[in-house]
Each structure stands twice: as C-alpha cells, then as structure tokens.
Image (tube, helix red, strand yellow):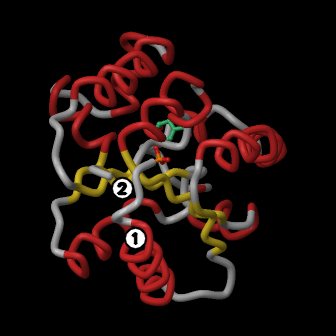
C-alpha cells in the first residue's frame, strides 16, 4: 500500500483529518483541491466558472493518474469517488477511508462556504439529495468506513491511524 485516500462528501472532515493523520503518522499530506488550485493558479470557484465542472473533473482524474508514487495521505474532493475510474485507481494504489458524516453535521459546516461552487448553486434539499446519491459510491470505493457523528477530530484521527497501522502491510 502506497497511499491513504480520504473520501466523503464536502464538509465530512477530509482535510482536517488528513492534516492530523499526517502529523500522527509522520507521512506527507496533500489536499487534492489545493494541488489543482496550485497547478491552475486559480481558485476552485474560478475554475468552475471559467472552464466548467467537466474540466474540473478531468483535473481531478489527471491528478490521481499522475501524482507521484509516494507513501502519503491524500484528501480528495467530494466528487472524486463518483467516477468509477477514479475509484478503481484509488483502490489499486492505496487504502481508501470513507469519512461518513451525517447530512445535518455537513450542512452546518458547509452552508455558508463561498469556496464551494456546488454549495453556492444548490439548495439544502438538492445537497441532501446529492449526499444520498453519492453515499453508495463512497461505500463501494472505500476499504473502511469511519462514522464521525459524535466523535472529536482527535478520536476520528486515532481510529483512522489504528486502521492504517492494522492494514498497512496488506496488498490491496
Ligand atoms: C466538490 C467538492 C469540493 C471541491 C469542489 C467540488 C464536490 O471538495 O472538489 O468544490 O463535487 O463535492 P471538498 O469535498 O473538499 O469540499
């Protein structure tokens, strides 16, 4: 196993857990959205506006395909695991952890976020429906599901680290 991927809906805590897990396990951490922002030299809302969502999805796929072969943690964007070739790639190159947060928790964290174009262009009901639609993709892509409800960031990170240590010698 080379990489540890964190997947899940927007606001499920992928970046917050990724950073903490990186500190705990002493392995480098990359935020896929930030890597795309760096490469493009513009923000996510700008990329969506200038080039459209399909282009952004292509960037996500390119990132997964070309990112260096290194023992690291990667937090993915909420739409990544919906594409079957992304799911396949992640499962082939690492351990996939699904951060399973409830929609009310997610909504609290994301509803005011101007940096998430999909939140900006959707109602609460639409996001709830998207959350339900995507969940089966997250489940099918992941090796491990981590429920986050009622747990602190620290507890979630420690549980994730336990799973990584338990499974790291497995060949996925
Ligand atoms: C998206 C999630 C975002 C970002 C983009 C699209 C999505 O990442 O990739 O705004 O389709 O769910 P986060 O899950 O880190 O918010």
Res 164 label:
1
| Structural distance between the alpha carbons of marks 2 and 1 | 8 Å
- Is the residue marked by circle 1 packed among few (<14), some (14-19), or many (20+) residues within 10 Å? many
The percent coordinates of residue 55 (x first, y second) are 41, 12
Please tell me whether residue 125 is drawn above or below residue 82 in the rendered image.
Answer: below
Residue shown at the point (40%, 51%) measured from the top left: 171
Please tell me whether residue 8 is drawn above or below residue 20 in the rendered image.
Answer: above
Please tell me whether residue 151 is drawn above or below residue 136 in the rendered image.
Answer: below
- Please count the marks in the image: 2
Q: Is mark 1 within 8 Å of ligand 1?
A: no
Q: Is residue 125 left or right of residue 114?
A: right
Q: Is residue 54 left or right of residue 106?
A: left
Q: Is residue 32 left or right of residue 122?
A: left
The percent coordinates of residue 115 (x first, y second) are 42, 44
The percent coordinates of residue 122 (x first, y second) are 70, 36
Residue shown at the point (40%, 16%) measured from the top left: 58
Res 41 label:
none
Residue shown at the point (60%, 43%) measured from the top left: 141
Residue shown at the point (22%, 38%) measured from the top left: 35
Please tell me whether residue 113 is drawn above or below residue 154 in the rendered image.
Answer: above
Res 4 label:
2
Q: Nearer the viewer, residue 172 or 126?
A: 172
Q: Are marks 2 and 1 in contact (CB under 8 Å)?
A: yes
Determine whether the residue tagged by mark 2 lies in a helix, strand or loop: strand
- Is the residue marked by circle 2 packed among few (<14), some (14-19), or many (20+) residues within 10 Å? many
The percent coordinates of residue 106 (x first, y second) are 64, 62
């Amino acid at each position: 196993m080379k990489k540890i991927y964190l997947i899940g809906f927007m606001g499920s805590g992928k970046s917050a857990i990724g950073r903490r897990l990186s500190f705990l396990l002493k392995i480098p951490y990359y935020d896929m959205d930030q890597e795309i922002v760096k490469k493009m030299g513009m923000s996510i809302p700008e990329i969506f506006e200038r080039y459209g969502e399909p282009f952004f999805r292509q960037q996500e796929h390119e990132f997964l395909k070309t990112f260096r072969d290194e023992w690291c943690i990667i937090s993915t964007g909420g739409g990544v695991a919906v594409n079957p070739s992304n799911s396949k790639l992640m499962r082939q190159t690492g351990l996939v952890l699904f951060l399973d947060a409830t929609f009310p928790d997610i909504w609290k964290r994301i509803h005011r976020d101007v940096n998430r174009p999909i939140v900006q262009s959707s109602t609460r009901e639409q996001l709830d429906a998207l959350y339900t639609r995507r969940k089966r993709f997250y489940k099918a892509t992941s090796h491990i599901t981590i429920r986050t409800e009622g747990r602190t960031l620290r507890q979630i990170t420690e549980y994730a680290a336990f799973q990584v240590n338990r499974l790291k010698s497995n060949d996925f």
